[in-house]
Amino acid sequence: MEPAISVRGLSKTFNGTVRAVQDISFDVANGEAFGFLGPNGAGKTTTVSMLTGGLAPTAGQATVDGIDVFHHPHEIKRRIGLVFQESTADPDLTGRENLELAAALFGVPRREVEPKIDSLLERMQIGDAADRLAKTYSGGMRRRLELGVGIIHSPRVLFLDEPTLGLDPQGRAGFWRYVQELRKEHGMTVFITTHYLDEADTICERIAIIDHGRIVATGTPSELKDRLGGDVVTVHPSRTGPDVEAAIRALPGVVAVTSYDGTYRVKAPRGEELIPTLVEACTRAGVGLTAVSLKRPSLDEVFLEFTGREYREDEGMTATDRAVRLGQASQALGRSRR
């Protein structure tokens, strides 16, 4: 069966010099939840915009739901669902009116509009607020409304571009519960970018990590964690140097040692057994330790391993991200008018 999303050699260069995306390739299976992670400026927003018909590529090919994205961008916009980080609901329309507008833009048959809207209002638990202006909605209610807008036309592929950023944990959990229900009932393929690694770990069946415009790792959450080679013991010594690193590397059970921001990240199959030996070795070397911590494999550690950065450092939008997202938002209102 043809993948829901297929990307081959996709690249995007801005102004002839800024290489935002560089020769990336991947497939997303039908019905799969696929996470696309990376720090700001890594290329994920640019990639999403190309796959949703908002940007033309510099090179490469891509299909979504069997349609060539670059030769038929308007058809893609009619077929996919898309929920942005930025709110796209019209605050001066009611929840029901927002859904009616989306249904008209997507060409939903008139006889289906009312039952679809009633069903979505109930599903998204905003039926009691259906005739209130959207600007009176809480953040979680507005996100659920925007999800309803994004799926009013029953798309086979749904793009979620950091849709829960800024929501409280309860709002995030509720949003993903609705997404999972949609996947289960309709076999919908979901392409997700998110700042929350716990969401990616829970929701996504496979993940790709992009950094500096290139995909640096792809796999299931479990596969990516396994590639770390075991537990990670983080050592904060009073000083660093070749002798300290050599002493750590010589310890039995140590798989790898990397230096990061004045600390050492030590991989070992059983981190809890390594710690006493590691402390003793540093003491013999005359090196004091300010802290030692143990982490089981997690997506946070995976991200640090493949990008050299902790995911919490992913703050603020780059100029490219702003330009791309402004373009996405401006297209959201008229994506099906052509």
Image (cartoon, helix red, strand yellow):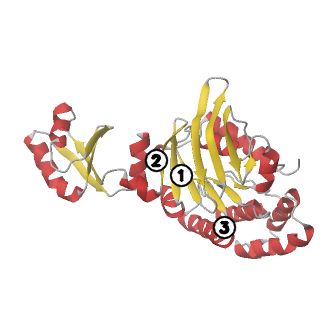
Which residue is painted at 67% across and 24% down in the image? Answer: 15
Which residue is painted at 47% across and 57% down in the image? Answer: 220
Q: Which mark is residue 187?
A: 3
- Lower position in the chain sequence, tag 2 or tag 1: 1
Q: Residue 316 carries which label?
A: none
Amino acid type at circle 2 is: Tyr
Residue found farthest to the front:
1
**Residue 164 screen position, x and y as percent:** 60, 58
From the viewer's perspective, is 175 left or right of 82? left
Give residue 119's quadrant in the image: bottom right
Judge the density around disc 1: few (<14), some (14-19), many (≥20) Cα neighbours within 10 Å: many
Considering the numbered disc 1 on the image, is that residue within a helix, a strand or a loop?
loop
**Residue 146 screen position, x and y as percent:** 72, 60
Residue found farthest to the right:
110
Considering the numbered disc 2 on the image, is that residue within a helix, a strand or a loop?
helix
Q: Residue tagged by mark 2?
A: 311
Q: Residue tagged by mark 1?
A: 195
Q: Could you give the CA–CA distance between mark 1 and mark 3, rounded to whole angstroms? A: 25 Å
From the viewer's perspective, is 151 left or right of 35? right
Circles 2 and 1 in contact, beta carbons < 8 Å:
yes
Which is nearer the eye, 300 or 251?
A: 251
Q: Tell me, yes or no, if residue 194 can be seen here.
A: no
Q: Could you give the CA–CA distance between mark 2 and mark 3, rounded to whole angstroms? A: 30 Å
Q: For the N terminus, give its image quadrant.
A: bottom right
Image vertical order of residue 48 relative to residue 143, above or below: above
Image vertical order of residue 42 relative to residue 164, above or below: above
Give residue 19's quadrant in the image: top right
Give residue 22's quadrant in the image: top right
Which residue is painted at 37% across and 51% down in the image? Answer: 227
**Residue 270 screen position, x and y as percent:** 23, 58
Q: Could you give the CA–CA distance between mark 2 and mark 1, rounded to whole angstroms? A: 8 Å
Which is nearer the eye, 45 or 170?
A: 45
